[in-house]
Image: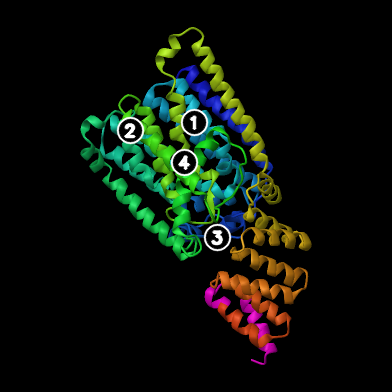
Amino acid sequence: MSKINISIPALIVILTLFVFSDVRTFEFLNYDDNVHITLNQRVTTGLSVENARWAFTHSHDGNWYPITLLSYMATVALFGMKPGAHHMVGLIIHIMNSVLLFALFYRMTQARWRSAFVALLFAVHPMHVESVAWISERKDVLSAFFGFLAIIVYTYYAKRPSTVKYICVLLCFIFSLMSKPMLVTLPFVLLLLDFWPLGRFDMGVKRLLLEKTPLIILSIVSSVVTIQAQKAWGAVVSLEYLPLRIRLENIPVSYLRYIIKLFVPEGLAFFYPIPDVIPVWQTGVSVIVLLSISITVLVMARRLPYVFTGWFWYIVTLVPVIGFVQVGLQAMADRYTYIPYVGLFAIAAMAPPSSIFRMPYSKSIISIAAAVVVILCVARSKAQVSYWHDSVTLYEHAIEAGGDNFMAYYGLGTVLSLEGKADEAATALKKSILLRPTYAKAYTNLGMVLLFQLQRPEEAISYFYKAIELEPRSANAQNGAGAALAMLKRPRDAVAYFEKALELDPNLEEARRNLDLVRREAGQ
């Protein structure tokens, strides 16, 4: 490999480390890090045969992602529960992804500096900060790592097909899906790459599709497993809570908003609430813009094949997280762009025609422009990384970013309650309820603060009742209502709520202890 080819990966590593190196001092967050890692006994006890078996045979928090769980366990086995070590593992994988992306595009296009631009944008774009700075999103970086490996192996297969190479593609794809099922669309991504830059369409579309059949079968199986796991954990939002009309209206709006944030990455937050009402004009404009671009791309596919592949890479790879099956209450998420943006980065890198470089000073002008873009991304990302230092900083930044962020107030209230700041916690949780009156968890947590920290059971019970009305299957709300009734000297009434809590979650030991106590008080 020439010196210039070595210098490009070195530049990627240096810039990425500069942007993200502070994560070594960051903390675990109470936003999912507790669910996936710090309160997950299988992870905190490290890597073992029993824990590995559990990772492969159980879904967790609506996900089946054994490879990611194994990576958490291995990190604990090597470094213990030091959050900085967990952060650095994720960062190292992201750096490897960025270098792999350079190697992939350079191999496919032989365009060294254009490939470098794709990889540098991927490495330091502000919208990718969430996937790297948030330990819980190890899923993203691992899924992309194995996905990029699958594509690289596929390029070797495409040049000289063999069974061994195809099996390697399948294995990498399986590992990607077992990290996070984001790349279920990989068979269609490979078909796009067959069009450009691999130039395999002369073989015929039918033959290329047949070639992808085993990959498509894996995608279908992974999709079914994922949906079943999410339903089992109650992670899929019901149509009653989030009507189909809002979901469908949000899809084109989100597609367009992601493109806008590619160019203007401002107002970034860990959570973007899906609105109760989306203005008709927003949906209409988004549909028109997206259709216009897509039709133009199709018409010019032969003339500008890189635009065709890049655009539909973006469209297709966002499909799993665009909201057809709604998991969570977010309208969109920065982390969802980790792989889809690669298509748009490729368009930007390949856009300047080769002929323009023959004009005086054009090469210098374009190089300076590209450098300025990368530097701006570095500066913006460096600032964005700092907001992920700890839970309070993350939530307060999201509130400052605007958008009536009920989830940020909910998270802030929860953290403040854990820190013993009960009055501030209650204020934040009430603000969350004001912004989203249908969010049951905010009522439950507010009830807990009022009951156990502020000793106001009469007020607390009303919030538990409301939480149960909104989410009857919430074991925590049922347990809270029982605890409030017990404190109000109504042990017989409390028994029914504790029993319901245990029926919903047999592992809720707090409810079991409470039930034993009130039964004794009630003479049972």
The residue identified by callout 2 is: 298
Which quarter of the rendered picture does the N terminus lie within?
top left
In the image, which disc is placed on residue 285? Answer: 4
Q: Is residue 455 magenta?
A: no
Local SS, label 1 = helix
The residue at 62%/55% (across/down) is 407
Residue 163 horizontal side relative to residue 357, left or right:
left
In the picture, measured across the screen, residue 222 lies left or right of residue 370, that is: left
Q: Position of residue 258 (x, y in %)?
A: 51, 40
Q: Nearer the viewer, mark 2 or mark 4?
A: 4
Task: Name above or below for residue 438 compared with residue 313.
Answer: below
Question: Residue 36 at x, y = what percent?
Answer: 56, 56
Q: Which mark is residue 99?
A: 1
Can residue 156 be seen by looking at this rendering? no
- Residue range corresponding to the magenta coloring: 501-524
Q: Give, as a three-letter code, the residue at label 4.
A: Val
Q: Residue 90 placed where, x, y %?
A: 56, 42
Dot 1 amino acid type: Val
Which is nearer the eye, 89 or 227? 227
Q: CA distance from mark 4 to mark 1?
A: 37 Å
Badge 3 is on which residue? 42
Q: Give the quadrant of residue 15.
A: top right
327 versus 313 height, above or below = below
Crowd around label 4: few <14 · some 14–19 · many ≥20 (10 Å): some
For badge 2, the amino acid type reads Leu
Q: Secondary structure at mark 2?
A: helix
Residue at left offset 67%, top offset 48%: 394
The mark that comes first in sequence, 4 or 1, is 1
Residue 368 in sight: yes
Q: Position of residue 237 (x, y in %)?
A: 49, 61
Alpha carbon distance from label 3 to label 4: 48 Å
